[in-house]
Image (cartoon, grey):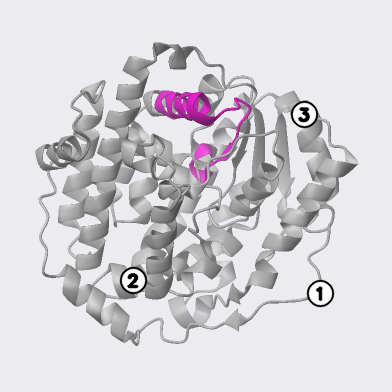
C-alpha cells in the first residue's frame, strides 16, 4: 500500500495569535450573541421531551453528570456565543437520542439480547491516525461501522423515512451541518473531518450517558476531567454496547469495528464490556499528536472562544495526554496478547499490509486479495497527504519545542518501542 505521488496543498495558519475573521465568521458570532440558553438539567431534558414526545430516559444516574457538564459550560468564561449555541444543541440532541434509544428498547426488548460479536476496537492517542485506520477497516463490508450521519441520529424518526426527494434525510442533515462548519472553519477538514459519510468515533454513543472525555474537547473543563477520571466508567461502556445493539437491530450486521482514543485510559472497562474483541492499540510519538491537538484547538478558538490564547491548550492538553498514556501503560496488561495488536506508526507507514494481516489474523477474518485491494483503494482515496495538510509550528505558535514536550513522556517510550518522530 502506497500513498501515491500526488500531494495536496499545504496550509500554514499564520494568524493563530491574532485571527483575521471572515465576514461569515463575524456574522455567525453576532447572530449567536442574540440568543441565550438555560444550561440546566431541567431545561435540557424538557427540551428533549418537547422534541421527541418521549419521557423515559431509563436510569437517571446520568443526571449528576449532565449537571456537571452544564456547570463546566457556565464556568468557562471564554466560551463564545457560537459555542453556547452549539453546546446547547448538542446536549439536547444527546438527551433526545437517549429517549429514542430507551423507547426502541422498551418496544423491542430483544435488542438487549443481540450479541456484539468479536468487535475490532481501535484505540490510540488523539490525532495520531486512528481515524484513518478506522475508516480503512470499515471499508471491509463484512464489518459494521457507524458513519457520522448515523452517529448524530442513531434512531430514525418518522421524519427520517426515505422519500423520492430525499432517500436519507439523516444524511442530508449531516451534510448541511458539515457544509456550515466547513464554511465557518475551512481548514478544519484537513485536521478533523465531519463529512456525513466519515466513520464516527463510538464516543457519540457514550455521550448519550453524558460521560466520556468528549466535553474536554469542547470546554475547558478540568472539573469534569477530574470527576470522569475518578469514577468507574463501566456503566457508560455498557451504554455504548446498548447503542451498538440498537444500531445492529436497525441495520445489522453484528460484527463491528469501532474506535475512540479514550479507550486507551479505560482498558479495564473496555475489556470487561467487550471480552472477545480484537484490540488494536496505535502508538506514535506523543509530540506529533499533541502539536496537532494544540493547533486544532487554537485555530477553532477564533470561533469557539472569545480569546485565542495558546496557553489554554498548552496548559491543558500536554498534561492530559500524559494521563491518557500513563493509564495505557498501567493497564495494557489486562488485554490478552492473543487478542491485541500494538501498531507503531513508524512501522505502519513502511509496511501497513503486514500489520493489517496481523489484525485480521487475530480477529479471525480472512484477508484475501479482494479484501486487500478494497483496503488499498480506500487508502488511496482517503490519503491525508493527498487531501491537503496543515503546518504545525510549535515554536512559533506555542513557544515550546518538541523536546520540551517529550521530556514528560519518557515513561511511555520506556514501555513501548515508539520512535521519536518530531524533531
Residues 407 and 58: in front is 58
Q: Which mark is residue 362?
A: 3
The residue sitting at the right extreme is 369
Residue shown at 21%/59% (left/top)? 84
The image shows residue 51 at horizontal and vertical percentages of 20, 40
- Left or right of 149, for residue 301: left
Disc 2 on helix, strand or loop? helix
Q: Which residues are magenta?
A: 238-263
Residue in the image at 26% along x and 21% along y: 58
Secondary structure under badge 1? loop
Q: Earlier in the sequence, mark 3 or mark 1?
A: 1
Q: Which residue is mark 1?
A: 5
- Under circle 3, the secondary element is helix
Q: What residue does disc 2 label?
A: 301
Nearest to N terminus: mark 3 or mark 2: 2
Q: CA distance from mark 3 to mark 1?
A: 32 Å
Name the quadrant containing residue 141: top right
- Out of 413 and 347, give the one closest to the viewer: 347
Figure quadrant of the C terminus: bottom right
Question: Residue 359 falls in which quadrant of the image?
Answer: top right
Residue 419 in percent (x, y) is at 73, 57
Main secondary-structure element of the magenta-colored stretch: helix
Amino acid at each position: 500500500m502506497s500513498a501515491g505521488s500526488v500531494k495536496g496543498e499545504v496550509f500554514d495558519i499564520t494568524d493563530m495569535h491574532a485571527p483575521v475573521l471572515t465576514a461569515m465568521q463575524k456574522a455567525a458570532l453576532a447572530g449567536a450573541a442574540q440568543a441565550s440558553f438555560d444550561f440546566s438539567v431541567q431545561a435540557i431534558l424538557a427540551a428533549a421531551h418537547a422534541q421527541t414526545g418521549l419521557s423515559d430516559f431509563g436510569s437517571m444516574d446520568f443526571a449528576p453528570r449532565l449537571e456537571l457538564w452544564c456547570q463546566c459550560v457556565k464556568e468557562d468564561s471564554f466560551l463564545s456565543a457560537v459555542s453556547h449555541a452549539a453546546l446547547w444543541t448538542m446536549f439536547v440532541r444527546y438527551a433526545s437520542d437517549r429517549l429514542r434509544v430507551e423507547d426502541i428498547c422498551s418496544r423491542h426488548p430483544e435488542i438487549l439480547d443481540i450479541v456484539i460479536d468479536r468487535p475490532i476496537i481501535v484505540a490510540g492517542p488523539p490525532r495520531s491516525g486512528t481515524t484513518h485506520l478506522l475508516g480503512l477497516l470499515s471499508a471491509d463490508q463484512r464489518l459494521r461501522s457507524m458513519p457520522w450521519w448515523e452517529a448524530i441520529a442513531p434512531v430514525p424518526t418518522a421524519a427520517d423515512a426515505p422519500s423520492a426527494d430525499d432517500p436519507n434525510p439523516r444524511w442530508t442533515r449531516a451534510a448541511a451541518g458539515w457544509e456550515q462548519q466547513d464554511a465557518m472553519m475551512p481548514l478544519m477538514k484537513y485536521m478533523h473531518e465531519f463529512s456525513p459519510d466519515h466513520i464516527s468515533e463510538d464516543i457519540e454513543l457514550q455521550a448519550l450517558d453524558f460521560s466520556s472525555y468528549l466535553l474536554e474537547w469542547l470546554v475547558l473543563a478540568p472539573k469534569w476531567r477530574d470527576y470522569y477520571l475518578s469514577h468507574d466508567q463501566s456503566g457508560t461502556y455498557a451504554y455504548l454496547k446498548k447503542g451498538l445493539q440498537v444500531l445492529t437491530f436497525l441495520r445489522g450486521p453484528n460484527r463491528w469495528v469501532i474506535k475512540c482514543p479514550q479507550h486507551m485510559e479505560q482498558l479495564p472497562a473496555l475489556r470487561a464490556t467487550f471480552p472477545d474483541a480484537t484490540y488494536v492499540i496505535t502508538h506514535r510519538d506523543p509530540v506529533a499528536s499533541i502539536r496537532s491537538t494544540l493547533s486544532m484547538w487554537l485555530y477553532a478558538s477564533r470561533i469557539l472562544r472569545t480569546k485565542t490564547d495558546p496557553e489554554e491548550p498548552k496548559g491543558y492538553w500536554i498534561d492530559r495526554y500524559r494521563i491518557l498514556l500513563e493509564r495505557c501503560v498501567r493497564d495494557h496488561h489486562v488485554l490478552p496478547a492473543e487478542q491485541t495488536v500494538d501498531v507503531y506508526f513508524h512501522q505502519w507507514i513502511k509496511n501497513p499490509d503486514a500489520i493489517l494481516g496481523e489484525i485480521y489474523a487475530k480477529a479471525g477474518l480472512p484477508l484475501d486479495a479482494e479484501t486487500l485491494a478494497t483496503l488499498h483503494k480506500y487508502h488511496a482515496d482517503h490519503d491525508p497527504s493527498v487531501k491537503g495538510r496543515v503546518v504545525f509550528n510549535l515554536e512559533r505558535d506555542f513557544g515550546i519545542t518538541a523536546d520540551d514536550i517529550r521530556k514528560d513522556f519518557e515513561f511511555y517510550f520506556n514501555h513501548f518501542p515508539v520512535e521519536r518522530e518530531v524533531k
